[in-house]
Amino acid sequence: MHDKLTREDIKKMEEEILHRKLVVRKECLEAVKEARAQGDLSENFEYYAAKKEKNRNESRIRYLERMIRTAQVIEDKMQEDEVGLNKEVEVYFEEDDETEIFKMVTTIRVDTMKGYISMESPIGKAIFGKKTGERVFVRINDNLGYYVQIKSVKPLAEEDKGNLLEY
């Protein structure tokens, strides 16, 4: 599966790769060297912890490089009142008589605890491209679904546009 990423997402990933290669890698190598100098490696917790952090960094670099290599680059060409990437959407759930605010982002930036959803999620698929005021059926599976109404759509605030998730 190819992740759908914007050019901005790819740029941020490239910046993280560069930081990890030039800064974090050197710090990790230095930590391993210092821990190794302490002597007996069979009982040296600091050595194993430093090696683990070094491997974690290298793994993250490979992961990001693979994501960039296999990414499907997309652009948001939605109008201002349409649900699209980097938009904040207020959604009314008819069944629950509740309103929630979601931030529509690419798959790499999903964080449901903070309200960041992707256009690949069931609700994201249903509301993507819809306009303010539209009533939409969100299909969960062949037998289940629910209706929502799009109350408002606005661009994301600058502070919401940035961070990529780390593992």
Image (cartoon, rainbow, N blue to C red):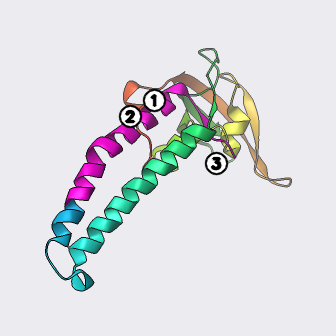
Label annotation for residue 15: 2
How many dots with numbers?
3
Label annotation for residue 93: none
Relative to the observer, which residue lies in front, 150 or 167? 167
On the image, the x and y values in percent for residue 76 come to 61, 22
Residue at x-position 20% and y-position 71%: 36
Q: Earlier in the sequence, mark 3 or mark 1?
A: 1
Q: Is residue 63 above or below residue 125?
A: below
Q: Which residues are magenta?
A: 1-30
On the image, the x and y values in percent for residue 137 come to 77, 39
Q: Is residue 122 above or below residue 89?
A: below
Relative to the observer, which residue lies in front, 144 or 26? 26
Residue at x-position 28% and y-position 49%: 24
For disc 2, the neighbor class at 10 Å (few under 14, some 14 to 19, many from 20) is few
Can you name the residue that lies furthest to the left here? Answer: 38
In the rendered structure, which amino acid carries the disc numbered 2? Answer: Glu
Residue matched to label 3: 96
Kindly tell me whether residue 64 is visible in this rendering: yes
On the image, the x and y values in percent for residue 152 come to 58, 25
Q: Tell me whether the residue at label 2 lies in contact with that at label 1, contact meaning CB atoms closer than 8 angstroms.
A: yes
Residue at x-position 27% and y-position 66%: 50
In the rendered structure, which amino acid carries the disc numbered 3? Answer: Asp
Separation of disc 3 and disc 2 at Cα?
42 Å
Residue at x-position 26% and y-position 57%: 28
Q: Earlier in the sequence, mark 3 or mark 2?
A: 2
Residue matched to label 1: 11
Q: Which quadrant would residue 41 be assigned to in this image?
A: bottom left
In the rendered structure, which amino acid carries the disc numbered 1? Answer: Lys
Is 112 included in the stretch rendered in magenta? Answer: no
Q: Secondary structure at mark 1?
A: helix
